Image (cartoon, rainbow, N blue to C red):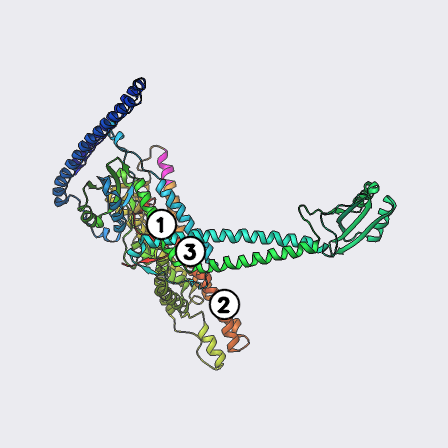
């Protein structure tokens, strides 16, 4: 296949050379025409037109020749590519066989390199999107001067324009949400649409126009509401002066000054009037109105005494009121303002009715938003390609299990391509896709929350699932809570058909609900001691005191604690075993012996000594600790290495195992809290009161434990378990695919 790619690049170079030759000929013709035009001006207009016409004809002929040459190269490229790609495709050459571990692990990836014809780019990108199996990246840096001249980066203008359209659609949906008469439920299922409906151009254009109309209408309503607010404030400013039969623009006569203004309400009106009389002589002051904050005054004073009157008024806190641009009395302005407010109200109703009607088009706008998302993804993928005038190149990744579908697709296009395994040096850049079954797939939300495993390492989900589900059931341990989890997951899944992380969450809730129910049956818990308490209220003489149980949190606390730490030890040893196998696969045999095998011998030795079998195994293990700890150290460093290794491992393993005591703690806490609420409800001896208190208390306990058990279970997996073998840092596989937010696409 590499030969095909090299041949393609050679042919592309020839095409580019032909195109460059055409451009050079055209530039030369333009230069000749310019020189001749200067000379032709001396010979008259007719000569000038003849020169220009001749130059243009030579340019067109040169362009035709160059394009014919480039087209010939392109045809030759197509035929050679098809001839050489066909035998390669028939021969395979891509080993995609998976071993047992790969069937439930990190999918094997193939690196894709492709060169195609520009005319087919748009359709090929669309087909790759529908395939949903190829992550498109930017091609590796092309070497050579000719290749650098051939290819150019993509143009992001199309993606930018689509992003603006997407933002407008999202804004319109947010705007119309408040005008929808029929609201969707919390767990409402998304409508199902076909690909034809999703990519209906007419419906898309109409929805985009509707969205823009909604935004324009909302803007108009916002402006109208702002005007209403302004008019309302203006009207309020007129109200205190509505009894004043004087135009608000009046400021006096030839000999008098007229003032209107306010003073604080606590100002004594009579004292103010006397102060003004004493300062200015004859003056008229009238109180127009008053409220809790201010007194509204009319002041008439001779012009000659204005300064003295103004000084006295200021000492009393007088503030002059001015109505700029207002004519007529306050009452007249109130009537005029009321008319404008009424018009605004009518306009607001019209705009609201229009937005309510447009809200009926919300489903179409949602579909258009999903369509726009697909177009953005395609445009962004196209921007990552390397382009020439007639060709394009892409690099990407495809899961090995999808190679067959990709090959079938590419058979219908004129392109050269190759698939190869990534080298170990490329592993950090290889995207990661996990392949799990229905039992382990819900654990993807746990893995994604922590970090994806690095490519080439082990998928933790199948190894984590039994422990996670079991530990959750131990901590929750109640049949009633388990039934609630099972029923909730079934009903929500059936009603809303959640996808992605939401779907994984409810799938995990179902599995953990089963585990919770089983552990509740073993401990005799059904909403704590709900049933015995209820029966005791109905029949005080009953002998029914508890449900059958293998063990109970209150009576067998020490046993549960020992069992929890034993389970923790099993999980830690399992993590060590996984690490041991992975190191052996990588050829790190000595590390596997000194890090894992050594401590297995120590653990086995402690068990043999505790059972009184023999002490020899422990001595062998301790000897291996000494040898392994100082294996690579020299001199005194051997001593410190031995001491550090023993201290770190002993404290580490002890702390990890002790951490699993939380299994017992949460089981005990949940059981005790439920019993406390049941006991409180049973004190009055009334069934109704008991049910109210018990339901409320158990509901609170269930909600708290639902989250608490998940958090503590997650901690055990991520810290105690993953720390033994897990290598994180994987990049999520992000193929070009149909990804929707508002609708489900029918398969």
Q: Alpha-carbon distance for marks 2 and 1? A: 47 Å
Q: Which element carries disc 3, helix, strand or loop?
A: helix
Label 3 vs 1, first from the N-terminus? 1
Q: Decide if residue 738 is on the left or right side of residue 290.
A: left
Label 2 vs 1, first from the N-terminus? 1
Q: Position of residue 495 (x, y in %)?
A: 36, 65
Q: Which residue is mark 2?
A: 697
Q: Which residue is mark 1?
A: 372
Q: Main secondary structure of the magenta part?
A: helix
Q: Position of residue 626 (x, y in %)?
A: 32, 41
Q: Position of residue 689 (x, y in %)?
A: 53, 75
Q: Is residue 45 above or below residue 339?
A: above
Q: Is residue 271 above or below residue 149?
A: below
Q: Is residue 149 above or below residue 479?
A: above
Q: Which element carries disc 1, helix, strand or loop?
A: helix
Residue at horizontal 80 percent and vertical 53 percent from the top: 286
Q: Residue 642 lies in magenta, yes or no?
A: yes
Residue at horizontal 47 percent and vertical 66 percent from the top: 699
Mark 2 near mark 3, Cβ–Cβ under 8 Å?
A: no
Q: Residue 165 lies in magenta, yes or no?
A: no
Q: Nearer the viewer, residue 716 or 353?
A: 353
Q: Decide if residue 459 is on the left or right side of residue 251.
A: left
Residue depth check, mark 2 versus mark 3: number of the one nearer the observer: 2
Q: Which residue is mark 3?
A: 712
Q: Nearer the viewer, residue 363 or 628?
A: 363
Q: Which residues are magenta?
A: 636-643
Mark 2 near mark 1, Cβ–Cβ under 8 Å?
A: no
Residue depth check, mark 2 versus mark 1: number of the one nearer the observer: 1
């Amino acid at each position: 296949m590499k030969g095909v790619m090299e041949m393609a690049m050679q042919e592309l170079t020839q095409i580019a050379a032909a195109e460059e030759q055409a451009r050079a000929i055209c530039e030369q013709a333009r230069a000749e025409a310019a020189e001749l035009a200067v000379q032709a001006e001396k010979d008259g207009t007719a000569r000038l037109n003849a020169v220009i016409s001749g130059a243009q004809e030579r340019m067109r002929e040169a362009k035709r020749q160059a394009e014919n040459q480039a087209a010939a190269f392109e045809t030759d490229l197509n035929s050679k590519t098809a001839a050489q790609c066909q035998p390669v495709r028939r021969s395979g050459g891509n080993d995609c066989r998976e071993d047992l571990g790969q069937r439930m692990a990190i999918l094997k990836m193939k690196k894709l390199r492709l060169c195609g014809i520009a005319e087919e780019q748009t359709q090929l990108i669309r087909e790759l999107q529908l395939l949903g199996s190829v992550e498109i990246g930017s091609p590796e840096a092309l070497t050579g001067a000719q290749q650098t001249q051939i290819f150019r980066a993509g143009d992001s203008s199309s993606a930018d324009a689509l992003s603006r359209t997407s933002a407008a659609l999202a804004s319109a949906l947010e705007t119309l949400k408040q005008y929808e008469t029929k609201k969707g439920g919390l767990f409402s299922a998304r409508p199902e649409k076909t690909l034809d409906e999703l990519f209906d151009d007419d419906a898309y254009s109409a929805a985009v126009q509707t969205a823009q109309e909604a935004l324009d209408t909302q803007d108009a309503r916002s402006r109208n509401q702002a005007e209403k607010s302004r008019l309302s404030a203006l009207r309020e400013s007129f109200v205190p002066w509505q009894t004043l039969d004087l135009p608000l623009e009046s400021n006096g006569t030839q000999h008098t000054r007229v003032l209107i203004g306010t003073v604080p309400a606590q100002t004594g009106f009579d004292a103010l009037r006397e102060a003004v009389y004493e300062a200015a002589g004859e003056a008229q002051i009238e109180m127009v109105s008053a409220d809790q904050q201010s007194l509204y005054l009319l002041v008439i004073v001779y012009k000659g005494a204005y300064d003295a009157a103004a000084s006295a008024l200021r000492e009393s806190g007088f503030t002059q009121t001015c109505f700029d641009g207002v004519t007529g009395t306050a009452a007249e302005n109130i009537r005029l303002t009321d008319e404008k407010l009424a018009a605004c109200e009518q306009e607001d109703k019209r705009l609201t009715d229009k937005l309510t009607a447009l809200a009926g088009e919300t489903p179409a706008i949602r579909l258009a938003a999903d369509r726009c998302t697909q177009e953005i993804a395609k445009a962004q993928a196209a921007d990552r390609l390397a382009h020439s005038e007639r060709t394009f190149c892409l690099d990407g990744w495809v899961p090995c299990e999808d190679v067959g579908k990709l090959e079938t697709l590419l058979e219908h296009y004129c392109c050269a391509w190759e698939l190869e395994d990534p080298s170990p040096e490329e592993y950090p850049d290889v995207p990661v896709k996990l392949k799990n079954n229905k039992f382990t797939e819900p654990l993807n939300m746990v893995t994604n929350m922590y970090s994806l495993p690095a490519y080439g390492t082990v998928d933790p989900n199948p190894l984590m699932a039994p422990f996670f589900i079991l530990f959750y059931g131990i901590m929750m341990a109640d049949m009633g809570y388990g039934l609630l989890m099972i029923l909730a997951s079934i009903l929500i899944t059936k009603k809303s058909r959640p996808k992605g992380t939401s779907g994984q969450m409810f799938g995990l809730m179902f599995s953990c609900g089963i585990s919770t129910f089983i552990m509740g049956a073993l401990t005799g818990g059904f909403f704590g001691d709900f049933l015995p308490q209820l029966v005791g209220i109905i029949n005080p003489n009953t002998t029914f005191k508890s449900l059958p149980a293998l063990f109970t949190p209150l009576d067998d606390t020490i046993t549960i604690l020992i069992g929890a730490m034993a389970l923790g030890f099993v999980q830690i040893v399992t993590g060590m075993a996984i690490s041991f196998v992975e190191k052996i696969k990588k050829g790190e045999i000595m590390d596997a012996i000194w890090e894992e095998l050594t401590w297995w011998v120590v653990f086995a030795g402690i068990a043999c000594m505790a059972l009184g079998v023999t002490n020899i195994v422990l001595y062998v293990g301790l000897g291996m600790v000494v040898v392994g700890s100082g294996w690579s150290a020299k001199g005194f460093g051997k001593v410190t290495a031995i001491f550090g290794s023993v201290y770190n491992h002993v404290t580490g393993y002890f702390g990890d195992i002790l951490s699993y005591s939380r299994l017992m703690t949460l089981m005990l806490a949940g059981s005790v809290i439920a019993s406390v609420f049941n006991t409180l409800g049973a004190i009055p001896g009334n069934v109704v009161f008991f049910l109210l208190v018990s339901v409320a208390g158990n509901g609170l306990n269930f909600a708290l434990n639902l989250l608490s058990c998940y958090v503590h279970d997650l901690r055990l997996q991520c810290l105690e378990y993953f720390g033994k073998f897990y290598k994180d840092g994987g990049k999520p596989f992000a193929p070009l695919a149909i990804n929707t937010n508002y609708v489900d696409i029918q398969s």
